[in-house]
């Protein structure tokens, strides 16, 4: 929590120390904040590679020097590979990971930095921002990824960002001294020696770490945005940002690669059918694109689990709308949207999560979003079941209306879908609820294998 914001503050202090121009500082500022935008795109691959919690592995790998084979990297592998599996299986997975470590690491970093750079371009940031994100994991001595660039071939912003993120991770986990020690040790190997000198000098003068342990780091970071080059977001930029973050969320698992956009399409369809004004439709599109942003906090070992979840795993899943709410409520202008997005798993009868709200607390916007979300999740393939045909999706959903989901919103969605398929025949069939006995919907407690949405 707060890693990018603190890394941004450290990086901006180094930028001022080495005398970067205001325009350069502006590009660096956005690149620092977005440096991990591509991170979700290799989560699934990393989880399958390690057969373990990839979020924990990603955090801890930053504390390990993978480029030197020794006790540290061995210890990392033993504590992060196939955790929870029987010993022999762990050894087998460990040997597989070790044998392919070089090529796999390169592939993993490549996916992440290409996706990160493409997201920055999509939002509309200038090319140096994208290039900086692309070069984040290059090392001064040429031993980094994805290209193996050396020394000044690596964009300066990327060099600053790599050092900043390492300093931040060691600061938080091991303290100031350890952070500077690792920077010095890796100077000339991972890091540009001149930047390490700048960081040391700032630290000596008490300027490097100032305010980083403060509760309101985010306000400090926001204040660092170079005013002369501040990028202002118009309506189009906000749309692009929502689309970009939907892409980040959907990249998390192969099963959700178009989920946020799918939910947005369904939510817009329902809203139009209900005759909502255009500004409400914009609101619904953005809420749908961002509703699952909290899923980034859930490990793929849970999201991609093919079978039923344990109680502990369910408890983690149930926190994702809370994280969506927490992330979105901090964005000025998104306060109302954060409430709608954070409530997308609430049910009218109080059986939902994470607040167990009941009908009188659930707004029309949330009801639309919930119906759209369940529809898209059922219509797509999931690790715990195949994609369902639309007729079957509606059969299942009808059993939950009106007690758990809003019947009017469901009707509107069926009308919309029937219209989209421009077939009166479908409309009549859907409205009549043909074949409603063939699919059994079970409660979460009975069997998660057929639960529409996790
Ligand atoms: Fe969700
Ligand atoms: Fe969702």
Image (spheres, rainbow, N blue to C red):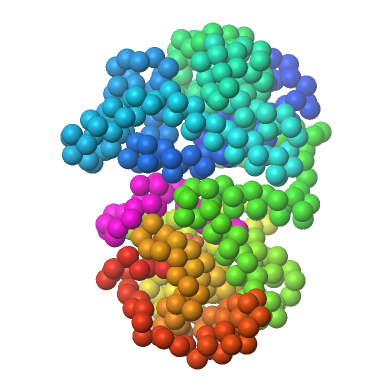
The image shows a total of numbered marks equal to 0
Q: Nearer the viewer, residue 302 or 293?
A: 302
Residue 362 colored in magenta in the image: no
Magenta part of the chain: 288-313
Task: Name which quarter of the figure residue 155 lies in.
Answer: top right
Q: Residue at x 45, y 88 (%)?
A: 434
Q: Give residue 60's position: percent from left, percent from top.
A: 39, 30
Residue at 52% x, 67% y: name it: 376
In the picture, measured across the screen, residue 301 lies left or right of residue 168, that is left
Residue sitting nearer the eye, 285 or 43: 43
Residue 34 placement: quadrant: top right
- Above or below, comparing residue 122 to residue 405 in the picture: above
Residue 325 vs 203, above or below: the answer is: below
Please state if 241 lies on the left or on the right of 216 as rendered. right
Residue 310 colored magenta?
yes
Q: Is residue 73 above or below residue 355?
A: above
Q: Residue furthest right?
A: 228
Residue 194 spot, x, y in % from top left: 62, 9
The percent coordinates of residue 311 (x first, y second) are 27, 58
In the rendered image, the vertical position of residue 278 relative to residue 93, given as above or below? below
Is residue 178 visible to us here?
Answer: no
- In which quadrant of the rendered view does residue 139 lie? top right
Q: Quadrant of the C terminus?
A: bottom left
State the residue at coordinates (74%, 42%): 124
Of 127 and 90, nearer the camera is 90
Inspect this view and state whether residue 126 appears: yes
Q: Residue at x 33, y 55 (%)?
A: 306
């Amino acid at each position: 929590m707060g890693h990018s914001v603190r890394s941004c503050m450290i990086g901006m202090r180094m930028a001022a120390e080495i005398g970067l121009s205001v325009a350069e500082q502006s590009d660096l500022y956005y690149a620092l904040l977005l440096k991990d935008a591509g991170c979700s795109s290799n989560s699934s691959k990393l989880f399958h590679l390690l057969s373990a919690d990839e979020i924990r592995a990603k955090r801890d790998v930053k504390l390990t020097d993978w480029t030197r084979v020794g006790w540290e990297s061995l210890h990392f592998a033993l504590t992060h590979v196939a955790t929870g599996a029987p010993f022999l299986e762990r050894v087998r997975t460990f040997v597989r990971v070790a044998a392919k470590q070089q090529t796999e690491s390169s592939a993993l970093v490549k996916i992440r930095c290409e996706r990160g750079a493409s997201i920055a371009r999509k939002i509309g940031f200038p090319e140096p921002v994208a290039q900086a994100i692309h070069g984040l994991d290059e090392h001064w001595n040429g031993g980094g990824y994805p290209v193996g660039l050396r020394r000044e071939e690596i964009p300066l912003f990327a060099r600053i960002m790599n050092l900043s993120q390492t300093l931040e991770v060691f600061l938080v986990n091991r303290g100031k001294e350890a952070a500077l020690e690792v920077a010095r040790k890796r100077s000339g190997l991972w890091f540009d020696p001149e930047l390490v000198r700048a960081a040391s000098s700032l630290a000596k003068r008490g300027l490097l770490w100032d305010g980083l342990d403060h509760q309101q780091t985010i306000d400090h970071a926001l204040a660092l945005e170079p005013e002369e080059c501040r990028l202002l977001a118009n309506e189009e930029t906000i749309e692009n940002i929502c689309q970009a973050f939907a892409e980040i969320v959907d990249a998390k698992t192969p099963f959700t690669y178009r989920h946020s956009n799918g939910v947005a399409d369904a939510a817009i369809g329902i809203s139009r059918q209900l005759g909502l004004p255009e500004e409400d439709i914009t609101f619904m599109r953005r809420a749908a694109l961002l509703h699952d942003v909290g899923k980034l906090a859930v490990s793929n070992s849970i999201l991609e689990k093919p079978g039923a979840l344990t109680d502990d795993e369910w408890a983690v899943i149930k926190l994702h709308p809370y994280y969506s709410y927490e992330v979105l409520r901090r964005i000025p202008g998104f306060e109302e949207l954060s409430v709608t997005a954070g409530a997308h798993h609430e049910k009218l009868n109080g059986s939902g999560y994470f607040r167990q709200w009941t009908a009188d607390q659930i707004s029309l916007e949330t009801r639309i979003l919930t119906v759209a979300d369940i529809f898209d999740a059922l219509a797509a393939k999931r690790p715990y079941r195949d994609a369902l045909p639309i007729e079957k999706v509606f059969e299942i959903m009808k059993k939950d209306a009106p007690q758990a989901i809003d019947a009017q919103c469901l009707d509107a969605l069926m009308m919309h879908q029937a219209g989209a398929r421009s077939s009166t025949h479908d409309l009549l069939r859907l409205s009549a609820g043909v074949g409603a006995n063939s699919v059994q919907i079970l409660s979460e407690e009975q069997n998660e294998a057929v639960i529409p949405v996790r």
